[in-house]
Amino acid sequence: MKKYNVAILGATGAVGKEMLEILGERNFPINELKLLASKKSAGGEVEFKGKKYIIEEATENSFENIDVMLCAAENDISITLSPAAVMAGAVVIDNSSAYRMDENVPLVVPEVNPEDVKKHKGIIANPNCSTIIALTALNELNSYAKINRMIVSTYQAVSGAGINGIKELDKQVKDINEGKEAVANAFQYQIAYNLIPQIGDFDEIGYSQEEMKMQNEGRKILHNPNLKVNCTCIRVPVYRSHSESITIETEKEITVEKARELLNNAEGVKLIDDLQNKKYPMPIESSDQDLIYVGRIRKDISSDNSLVLWCCGDQIRKGAATNAVQIAEVLVKENLI
Ligand SMILES: NC(=O)c1ccc[n+]([C@@H]2O[C@H](COP(=O)([O-])OP(=O)(O)OC[C@H]3O[C@@H](n4cnc5c(N)ncnc54)[C@H](OP(=O)(O)O)[C@@H]3O)[C@@H](O)[C@H]2O)c1
């Protein structure tokens, strides 16, 4: 079997570390592995499959002979280094939002639009984590009855802001419990024992950047330029797994029974919808695995052809690292690297 030279840019971060785990778990056929991060992490040691790897400082010259570069760094770093990786002959799978809306860059959720991978010109973008979670949950419903409109509220874990988000919740809980003041750096305000209704900057009509991603990226992934999305994104003091309350309006009715049947057979989805036994998705249960848990399916009593559901998914795994590795697997399967 052919093996590939793989680089992870941002290998010391929340997403990068998880990518390494998932490459191992899924037995991705790796020949050489290069782990890249900032200068401050260079020289650090990481073990993978019983072998020690040294973290290297990422530069434009880091990508010689690399077949696939998994980018798990912020936009500015991706913008500087992804083109260098492409120039060196690698295919880049980028977790930042830098290239997602570029018309030359496919935006892919493998359960939804794997065929778009074939159109790549060097870079493939991983969608926003909340968008991946929502669309994995909704894909089979959308295939049965096209979704025209979505109303979404997200409840996003602190690890969505990377390692600094996790550290900040830890420290604030500890400080508050010791009677000290909670200091906010990673988030705008204290996140411990609080919710923050802002993720990203606001636009002129009052929507945050994170909220607009659900509509803009959703349209591109579903190939539905008329999709209307009204999204509210909230940061919550949960370590891991984003949760979403979603109302969809569809072009024809989907009964609750039909929705359950579709979701029971949907790729990447686990249906947990048993109210009598108090069974529904919760972030503590959907963490550390790859399926999107869906439940609380009910008719929208305020509108026709409209359905309400609740879903939870591990945004570091399926919302980022796993989705990227799945894209790399599509590249292998389609002989595109
Ligand atoms: N966290 C999530 O749930 C999530 C979900 C979807 C998408 N994303 C996206 O994935 C990307 C990574 O997020 P994250 O949460 O993993 O962030 P993170 O935990 O803060 O990690 C950032 C990574 O980038 C590296 N880095 C920083 N400056 C660098 C430089 N100058 N050169 C090379 N590497 C550098 C860091 O290395 P050092 O350790 O050396 O600083 C670290 O490995 C972001 O674009 C984010 O928006 C995150």
Image (cartoon, helix red, strand yellow):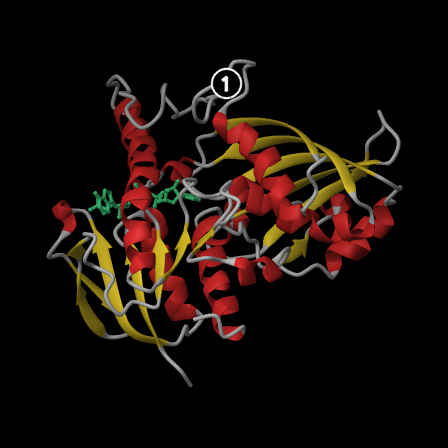
* Label total for image: 1
Q: Residue 312: in sight, yes or no?
A: no
Q: Which residue is mark 1?
A: 203
Q: Which quarter of the figure is the C terminus placed in?
A: bottom left
Q: Is mark 1 within 8 Å of ligand 1?
A: no
Q: Secondary structure at mark 1?
A: loop
| Quadrant observed for ligand 1 in the rendered image | top left
- Residue 191 position, x and y percent, is 39, 25
Q: Is residue 252 left or right of residue 324?
A: right
Where 334 sits versus 269, above or below?
below
Residue at image position (54%, 72%) is 334
Name the residue furthest left.
Answer: 43
Q: Which quarter of the figure is the N terminus placed in?
A: bottom left
Residue at image position (40%, 43%) is 96
Q: Quadrant of residue 268?
A: bottom right
- Residue 46 position, x and y percent, is 21, 62
Where 35 sits versus 154, above or below?
below
Name the residue furthest bottom.
Answer: 1
User: Residue 65 or 1: which is nearer the viewer?
Assistant: 65
Residue at image position (77%, 45%) is 276
How packed is label 1: few (under 14 Cα within 10 Å), some, or many (20 or more)?
few
Q: Is residue 304 left or right of residue 48?
A: right
- Residue 218 position, x and y percent, is 62, 41
User: Residue 40 or 86: which is nearer the viewer?
Assistant: 86
Which residue type does callout 1 highlight?
Asp
Q: Residue 317: in sight, yes or no?
A: yes
- Residue 86 position, x and y percent, is 34, 58
Q: Is residue 110 left or right of residue 181?
A: right
